[in-house]
Image (spheres, helix red, strand yellow):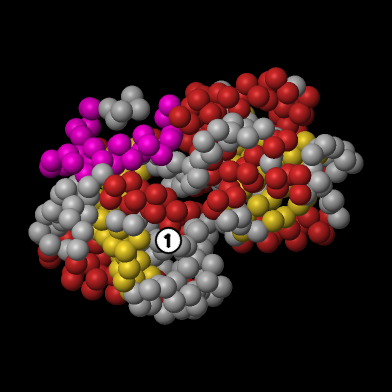
Amino acid sequence: MMKFAREAKIVFVNRYFYPDLSATSQLLTDLAAALAASGFPVHIICSRQRYDDPSARLARLEWIGRVCVHRVRTTRFGRDRLLGRALDYATFYLSSTIAMLRLLARDDTVIAKTDPPLLSIAAMLAARLKGAQQINWLQDIFPEVATRLGANPLPGPLDKLLRHCRDGSLRFARVNVVLGERMREQLQLKGIPPGTIRVIENWAELAPDKPKPAGHSRLRSQLGLSDQFVVGYSGNLGRAHEFQTMLSAATLLRADPGIVFLMIGGGTGMGRLAQAVAELGLTNFRFLPYQPREAVADALAAADAHWVSLLPDLEGFIVPSKFYGILAAARPVLFIGDPDGELAREIGKCHCGAAVPVGDAQGAVRHLAAWRADVGLREQIGRNGEEAYHRRFCAERAFAQWNAVLTQPGRAVDAGVQSPSGR
């Protein structure tokens, strides 16, 4: 049995973990490995599935490096049908709660992520019963996201009850880790004590040691795009992400053979976008599936610029983490969404790209044309982003912030004390 520098366990709860390649899994895998390397005894409670393969049967118990992974049984309906997804959620709530009650001891810390939604409620119950501390790591805020997307299936009274319980789990927690200032603002509006809220931004899932010039990307060469201006998108394009603005921009540019839109990833929005592209007869798009993790840096380098989007109604509830990979790759980023949104604010501070409102296809075309025409401008914007990444958004900085949260006695920093970022 391995011996650790600290006796109290850190127990993360999330539906997916390595070898799964979903964003929450990869971020958790990175952090768990870093904390274990620092001497924390780290345990993971997750399902035996993968995000893209509900039929996967991963090992019930295994050590991955210095991290102990406990995988619980759930139903395996997958994400295609709402009822099946709900049953998968329900069985994970039940199985993970049982696992927490078995694993947690007094003074341990349970860290609940937000897949499935409202997992912090189950973590609160287990923490109370076992005398453990709770930290919530909010990647998004549900059920508000579902409500704003018009996809909340909960009856009004049940929705109200679950929000009340969710807010109770946030107040109970020693720390609530959020991804940005707009998300902090949302929690404060819900009456969550400001001193319990800590901003720790996500990081690039796999940052390159040194950004590649576009001409050095193997993927770009394989696709025959060496002589074109490539506008990239990498990751999930889901219900929260607006794509009509960029589709309209691509339509305006359809007669220009020198520009191509490279879409890498998946999600419901990716399928809808591909269908719209086919219906419009556009030939300036390329669609590829998710790339293996070791190929992500090369895939990001394949583009001359990248775009990210978020529906304005979801500001403060979601922060697209693909933004950080773009910065690490030293590419300009075009954000489509709320001009006062989290990413729009950061782009303005870092001078690493541009932001346009939803529907402003002409504005998107203007920025892309400027970056295409001026290589020096494009490279300077990319360097600005890379510098901002290493200064404020790199994995090592986030790991240090997490280490500070976990070794800090009592509750989180007082409301008047700023985080290391100076916020």
Q: Is residue 170 visible?
A: no
Image: magenta residue range: 391-417
Element marked by disc 1: loop
Instruction: List x then y, in percent, for residue 159.
Output: 36, 64
**For residue 154, side relative to residue 306 (left or right):** left
- Report the number of discs: 1
Give residue 273's quadrant in the image: bottom right
The front one of 398 and 297 is 297
Give residue 143's quadrant in the image: bottom left
Q: Residue at x 26, y 44 (%)?
A: 38
Instruction: List x then y, in percent, for residue 373.
Output: 78, 24
**For residue 193, side relative to residue 183 (left or right):** left
**For residue 171, side relative to residue 23 (left or right):** left
Classify the position of the N terminus by image quarter.
Answer: bottom left
Q: Residue at x 44, y 71 (%)?
A: 49
Can you say whether 220 is above or below 417 in the image? below
The front one of 220 and 80 is 220
The 10 Å Cα crowd at callout 1, few under 14, some 14 to 19, many 20 or more, is some
Instruction: List x then y, in percent, for residue 311.
Output: 56, 46
Kind of residue indicated by mark 1 = Tyr
The front one of 325 and 315 is 325
Does the magenta run of residues contain 252? Answer: no
Classify the position of the C terminus by image quarter.
Answer: top left
Q: Residue at x 41, y 68 (%)?
A: 154
For label 1, the residue is: 18
**For residue 265, side relative to residue 254 (left or right):** left
Q: Is residue 290 visible?
A: yes
Instruction: List x then y, in percent, for residue 293.
Output: 54, 53
